[in-house]
Image (cartoon, coloured by chain):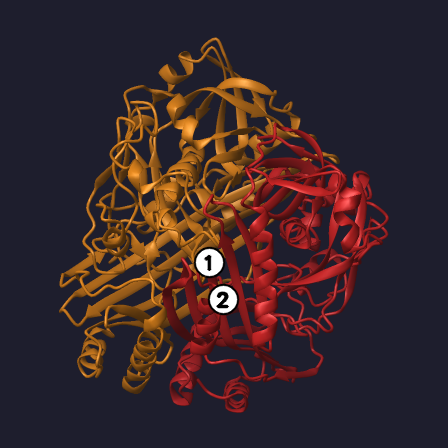
Chain colours: A orange, B red
Amino acid sequence: MFDFHPQLKQRFAALRTGAEFFSLRYVRESGQHLSVRKNVAEPPSLNRDEGAMLTVRVNGVEAYAATNDLSQAGLQAALERAEQHARRLNPHALLDLREQAVSSDRADYFSPHFDQAFPPLSDCYQLLGDESASVPTDERLVNWQASIGLTQVEQIYLNSAGAELRQAQRFIYPALDVTAFDGHDSQTRTLGRENFGQQGGFDVISRCGLIGAGPRIADQALQLLMAPNTPQGPRDLLLMPDQMMLQIHESIGHPLELDRILGDERNYAGTSFVKTSDFGHLQYGSSLLNVTFDPDIPEELASYSHDDDGTAASKQFLIREGLLLRPLGGALSQFRAGLDGVANSRACGWNRPPIDRMANLNIEPGDQALEQLIQGIEHGVLMRTNRSWSIDDARNKFQFGCEWGQLIENGELKGVVKNPNYRGISAQFWKSLRAVGDASTSQVLGTPNCGKGEPNQVIRVGHASPACVFSHVDVFGGDA
Amino acid sequence: MSTVNNEAGAFKALVDWLRDALRETEQFTLGYAAESSAFVRFNHGKVRQAGQVQQANVSFKLINDGRHADLQITLSGDTETDQQRLAEGLQQLRETLPLLPADPYLLLNHNHWHSDNVQAHPLPETEQAVAEITRAADGLDLVGFYAAGPISRGFASSSGAFGWHQANSFNFDFSLFHENGQAVKASYAGHEWSSEGFVRRFEQAREQLEFLGRPLRTLPPGEYRAYLAPAALEEIMGMLSWGGFSARAIASKQSPLQKFYAHEASLSPNVWLTEQVSGSLSPAFSDEGYPRDDLTLIAKGTANARLVNSRSAAEYGLGANGASSYEYPTALDMQGGQLEQKYILEQLGTGLYISNLWYLNYSDQPAARLTGMTRFATFWVENGQIQAPVSTMRFDDSVYSLLGSQLEALTRERELLLSASTYSQRATASMLLPGALVKRLTLTL
């Protein structure tokens, strides 16, 4: 672990530049994706990646150069390219960062159980093969697949102010999906995949519930195939954590990213319906809504000690009792906007620069058990497991779809319905939050697939949430 | 960054080393991807973030005794270091293969084909491009992204196949914002930067911006006549590309076009769609090492070929046709129709002129029912005249309606849309598309 650290420090110390500040972020990543589809092991996909990004500040203008050449000469050449960029583009620069403070922190961070080896590849294939084989024989079951993704990342950040930050993390993504087809319609039921990722080791597989899940997931796919479409019209909506994570992500996370609010993303990921003047004033949701940036839940995907600019991370309320308090903005965005933010300046790898990203964005639990949430609904629908998401560029008008729906009538769960969709407007939707589940309903979830930025970056984000009830939501089904 | 010749030479040297290192029963394929990219972000007409990225990697597949595994390795650019990394990778794969069962769907291409395509138009210095952009943007609220530099792709196999593709390219993808928050989107992309060409493209966008200053029109949900410009149609085709034409997705009932390929649904007879690899910007060989065929995917509104990679070919008894491992098209070419561009507004009459769509996803995938948003310049048109920009609206409609029963016309002129995607690496994908006039588009929110 960190075996390149002594060499890297030596090379960093030997770098020469006329810049007033410079930093080096080294990332080494390795991974494997293993899958068994319809009882056939697919070839493993493995990767090894390493490189470094050099960032300089010259006369208040920052620029970067990323390189795959980690030799002394390679790092020096990258530093010089970055410096040349900063000097040449100075007349056209938007920002003057001469007064922006830089980190001088020193710390190490490790994922839980990082020192414990992950089971060998043959054991993983055995597990996946067993799950695949446990899917019952039924001619309507046309496709199924069990998989485990694993990514291990070591990062070392050094800068000319003396910062030295090392992080070693392991991310696990278990998954199982089954597709059923009746000659006309098809329905897929999923466990994990893009909804469930955590830091840790084999414990993540256990928490996900992958082991022994085959028959249940297959049965649910068949139930969906035989189910009627979700009825159209306004209903109360009970969202389970594996849909809440998407709801939080799209209609709280993205609109609160400060770089979007400052306009950086208007050409690609979009803008926000939130303005800088809204912080401290805007009633974002009902008084039951409490949203935190929380880097301290060890197994959550984006827990860390420092972000990729070297800022120390700590838990912060972004929304308390429905009132908007703080944006998702890292040190640079805070400097630009004059607002307090969080440590969320993050890059997806050595070849992309840090920008404002979601990290762990969570809803704090309330006080009702799942039974109480259901009992409180007269005419509603429960939805779980996101499968479709679409929202406008200001993150306001949304439409989301789930895999699994279940009607609720007079406080009781009723029949399964397929193609459950709902639509709404972020600025109004959170005000309809009527009940929040307690800790027993809460799950720590996360996805590796949040896209944003120019150049494009896809990054890991964590979302922990209880089940939540929203009043009078426009729900509907599909055509088939 | 190394020059074209020594980069190809370095790749060949790795291939030679690997060939010598193999044991008698072992086989390999080796893909190569590298780029040296200048990246410049703009906000408010100024440079927000700028940098340069140099990267290279190989995708190494080792095959032995019916077993195989893939390993992607980042290269350093130094011959000795990279041979060492490849040697370590070879060792890792040799230790991995005995842990695997034989793969019944392994299908190797034993042809020793050769392909070589090098395009080395000089690109402008980044500083020059930035100066031209900021000069054009003077007084305007421009947001955008300039990406430029050489891209290389290579492939080699133990059977003697060898492919090399290298091209210099740039893509300036930008938006101009009116002070009321409305915006127009445009791009200037290709192999050869022309100052005059850039100014012309910029002026077209600036002209559209003037319409955006009119008072915003808010529409109620309902059904509307609509014109989808090529960039809007690109979003629909992009969505269908995820599994739509994939042999595996079709066979496993996960394709949005499964009813289409089952001949239970059809599109307008005016729809012809080809994966037109020849003459496109993407490599003539797949990441699996198959030469890529030109394929007619849709002929006269009915399903024709599908994209078949080697694994699907083996599993479903089909012929491999050079599809990528994801069976995703990268050079779609839709045939134009009869509607001349100058008559678009007149034939639209009263309805929506939609320049771009955004964030599409499925409401009901087996039914090919899509939802998404209007974004950037969308106008309300009455009697062939642009009246006002339209506030952001959500649509929810079936592809079988939009490109089927409700498709009134396709434009004669088509637009070449070069992908601005830079996830992991700069894309080489493109689409050549007409605009589409539809009799009914359903807006829901």
The three-letter amino acid code for the residue at tag 1 is Leu
Res. B416 mark: none
The three-letter amino acid code for the residue at tag 2 is Ala
Q: For the residues labelled 1 and 2, say whether their Cβ atoms are less than 8 Å apart.
A: yes
Chain letter for mark 1, please.
Answer: B
Q: Is residue B37 left or right of residue A311?
A: right
Q: Earlier in the sequence, mark 1 or mark 2?
A: 2
Is the residue at mark 1 from the same chain as the one at mark 2? yes
Residue A106 is at least partly visible in this image: yes
Disc 2 crowd rating (10 Å Cα; few below 14, some 14-19, many 20+) is some
Q: Which residue is mark 1?
A: B142
Where residue A304 appears, as percent x and y from the top left, is 24, 52
> From what the image shows, is residue A347 above or below residue A61?
above
Q: Which residue is mark 2?
A: B136
**Residue drawn at the location 55% of the way across and 63% of the way down:** B420
Viewer-nearest of discs 1 and 2? 2
**Residue drawn at the location 55% of the way across and 38% of the way down:** B215
Chain letter for mark 2, please.
Answer: B
Name the secondary structure under disc 2: helix
Residue toward you, A120 or B307: B307
Where residue B307 appears, as percent x and y from the top left, is 71, 59
Residue A52 is at least partly visible in this image: no
Where residue A162 appears, as percent x and y from the top left, is 13, 69
Where residue A45 appears, as percent x and y from the top left, is 49, 63
Q: Is residue B283 left or right of residue A205?
A: right
> What is the C-alpha distance between the residues marked 1 and 2?
9 Å
**Residue drawn at the location 68% of the way across and 39% of the way down:** B366
Q: Which image quadrant: the C terminus of chain A?
A: top right
Name the secondary structure under disc 1: strand
Residue toward you, B189 or B168: B189
> From what the image shows, is residue A126 above or below residue A19?
above
